[in-house]
Amino acid sequence: MKLNVVAAAIVLALPLLSRGQEFSGVSGIAIDADSGKVLWSKDADTPRYPASTTKIMTALLLIERCTPDEIITAPADIENTKESSMHLKPGEQVRAKDMLYALMLRSANDGCVAVAVHISGSVPAFAKLMNERAKAIGCNETHFDNPNGLNDDKHTISARDLALIAREAMKYPMFREVVRTHKHEIVRSLNQADRMMVGKNKWLLKDPTADGIKTGYTVPAGHCYVGSATRNGFRVITVTLKSEHWQQDHQNLLNYAFAKFKSTDVAPAMTPLGKGTIKNGSAPSVALGAEEPVKEVVRKDRTGVTTAVEAPALMAPIRKGQRVGSLIITDADGFSRKVPLVALADVPAQTLVGGVTKMNGLSYGLFGGTLCIGAALMRRKSRRMRFYGRSTTGRRSF
């Protein structure tokens, strides 16, 4: 029955959302999590206040820079951090993974400061690291000034950039595990009375396909939400900024994306898709394939996909599983991306001695050269024996 209600909502929401009338946020976007393809957008490149959705980047750096059991110690001035808090005490110690739950469920601003100081030594230094990581991801309209999203005129990001950061974070299993969780009890060294971290993401309890990600709110930012849901074999990430009805906006974005688009098979895993030419190899080429099954999210009314193999000139030896090229996928909308390809076989280097190719573990050239040298040595030894035999005849030995 619930599925029928969702299907009906999809039908009703589609025409209005298509005209931009059923999205109350000032900026928004929906993307395919696998490829990054934009499925819908509204004013997606204008920098805006992100509120606590900032913590997605802080969590990403926490995962990338710390081990799960690494101990994070709260700095001496930690109680000066305002708003949402896990009530850290100066010197209190929390494991990195538990801190991740505190950031993403409780939205702990003080936890973010403790992470920033632990990783970079100070909040300004950590903000610099956040901006560098955003640039590496491909963000062009991002400027982080703090790790938690407390309002700051200089602290802004676009909906598109926020979706890219969320997409990067969702590549990590530990991040996915945390953001789909509603409640988690952490271990901490001091404040034992406050161990249960309960999520602020009410949508997780309403949608069985939901698997994240983060809410945010300040008065200047309004209601913000970065969401994720997996249906029909693919995941959609949504961003809603300064929304009047963030849950409805997010629902409408999901309904639109899953009604308009589908996942289609492009290529199975480890199946030859093309060849790479090899120089100095025991074989002139090697078959190339994808490590994982390749799928593409396409419009249901425009399903055409074209592919092309791109492989540089390869130099032996080549190892099976070595990344050696790309599969270029282009859909009917003109969206194009590259998927890494790997060699499907080992190709050892060709051994040449005297222009003769290695065969059966021995080179004919090496073998022939050895015979020639051996014969020459034998002839020389024979001549020396004859010479000394003549010169010593009839002589006395001393």
Image (cartoon, helix red, strand yellow):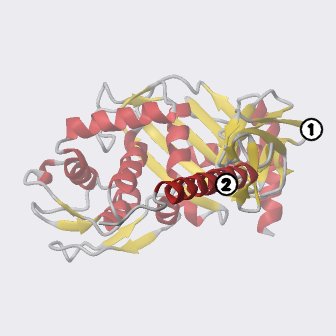
Q: Which mark is residue 375?
A: 2
Picture layout, residue 122 above or below residue 139: below
Query: Disc 1, disc 2: CB below 8 Å?
Result: no
Q: Residues within 10 Å of mark 2 (few under 14, many from 20)?
A: few
Instruction: Determine whether the residue tagged by mark 2 lies in a helix, strand or loop.
Output: helix
Identity of the residue drawn at 56% across and 34% down = 25
The spot of residue 10 in percent (x, y) is 79, 49
Identity of the residue drawn at 25% across and 72% down = 194
The spot of residue 30 in percent (x, y) is 65, 39
Q: Nearer the viewer, residue 178 or 7?
A: 178
Q: Nearer the viewer, residue 5 or 320?
A: 320
The spot of residue 127 in percent (x, y) is 28, 36
* Res. 12 in view: no
- Distance from Cα at disc 1 to Cα at disc 2: 78 Å
Q: Could you tell which of marks 1 and 2 lies nearer the N-terminus?
A: 1
The spot of residue 53 in percent (x, y) is 43, 44
Picture layout, residue 290 above or below residue 41: below
Q: Which residue is mark 1?
A: 301
Identity of the residue drawn at 49% across and 41% down = 165
Taking 51 as reference, is 377 left or right? right
Taking 383 as reference, is 49 left or right? left
Query: In the image as oriented, which residue stretches furthest toward the front?
Result: 394
Instruction: Determine whether the residue tagged by mark 1 lies in a helix, strand or loop.
Output: loop
Name the image quarter holding the C terminus.
bottom left
* Res. 136 in view: yes
Amino acid under label 2?
A: Ala
Q: Residues within 10 Å of mark 1 (few under 14, many from 20)?
A: few
Amino acid under label 1?
A: Asp
Q: Which mark is residue 215?
A: none
